[in-house]
Image (cartoon, rainbow, N blue to C red):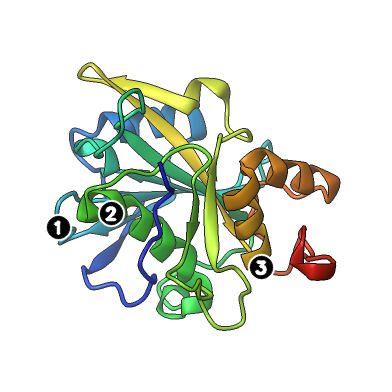
Amino acid sequence: MAEPTITPLYPLTAPMQRQPESVVLPHDPVGEHIATHLGAPAMFFHETDGGAVQVDIHVIGPTADFPYVRLVTSGMSKRPMTTPEGAPPFAELIMTLPANWQLDEAAIKEERWYWPVALMRHLAHYPHNQGTWIGLGHALPNGAPPKPYVEGVGFCGAILLPPVSAPEPFHSVTVEGKDIYFHCVVPLFKEELDLARHQGFAALIDKFNDKDVTDVVDPARKNTVKKKFLGLF
């Protein structure tokens, strides 16, 4: 089955409010799973009008053991995706950011800081809005042709990979008989996106390993794929 092509990220219409740590989202087994394995969230981005599903984004702050920021969705798995036979229909997403990534009240008004939150939110809604699915290894362009998520950042797509930097027990959770799998969102340059779509995500992982690229988002990192003569990888 062909991988989905998402519509461009911007604009996003449903409002999302930034909530402080003291706000507890009620009756959220996925949120409890996140807190158990990754730590209590420093804050939430709480969606007030999400459409088919309401997606909250948990922001897990850096620690001495893991000095990075994590964004993790809850709510995407409230409804099953429309999957082919044998594919898991329930998923949530995680993204890892540098420790100094700005997500305060002022910063999130600027796209250069807010775009990872917007991307997570967009991907979480996409399968429900389009009657499709996204899963492990899917390379997802930002429109056709792919457009950068934000001016000044070369990433114009993303791939879903295993959340290898998170503890293994975090990778999945069973809620009310539903097996929910967490996928790591890793932004890509166009050439990386093309490689993953044409040769499979294992080929891209080889490039990542060669260049020591991790799942931590780094807008300044180099493109791991350069086209050779005649456009061949």
Q: Which residue is mark 3?
A: 219
Q: Hey, which residue is sitting farthest top in the picture?
A: 177
Give, as a three-letter code, the residue at label 1.
Answer: Gly
Vertical side of 185 occupied by 156: above or below:
below
Mark 3–mark 1 Cα distance, whole angstroms, equals 30 Å
Q: Are marks 1 and 2 in contact (CB under 8 Å)?
A: yes
Identify which residue, 175 or 35, lies in the foreground: 175
Q: Residue at x 31, y 32 (%)?
A: 84
Q: Which quarter of the image is occupied by the N terminus?
A: top left
Q: Secondary structure at mark 3?
A: loop
Give, as a three-letter code, the residue at label 2.
Answer: His
Q: Which mark is residue 125?
A: 2
Q: Earlier in the sequence, mark 2 or mark 3?
A: 2
Q: Earlier in the sequence, mark 1 or mark 2?
A: 1
| Position in image of residue 176 (x %, y %) | 20, 19
Q: Which quarter of the image is occupied by the C terminus?
A: bottom right
Q: Hey, which residue is sitting farthest front in the picture?
A: 230
Q: Which mark is residue 51?
A: 1
Vertical side of 29 occupied by 50: above or below:
below
- Discs 2/3, front: 2
Mark 2–mark 3 Cα distance, whole angstroms, equals 24 Å
Vertical side of 163 occupied by 187: above or below:
below
Q: Are marks 2 and 3 in contact (CB under 8 Å)?
A: no
Mark 1–mark 2 Cα distance, whole angstroms, equals 8 Å
| Position in image of residue 111 (x %, y %) | 47, 78
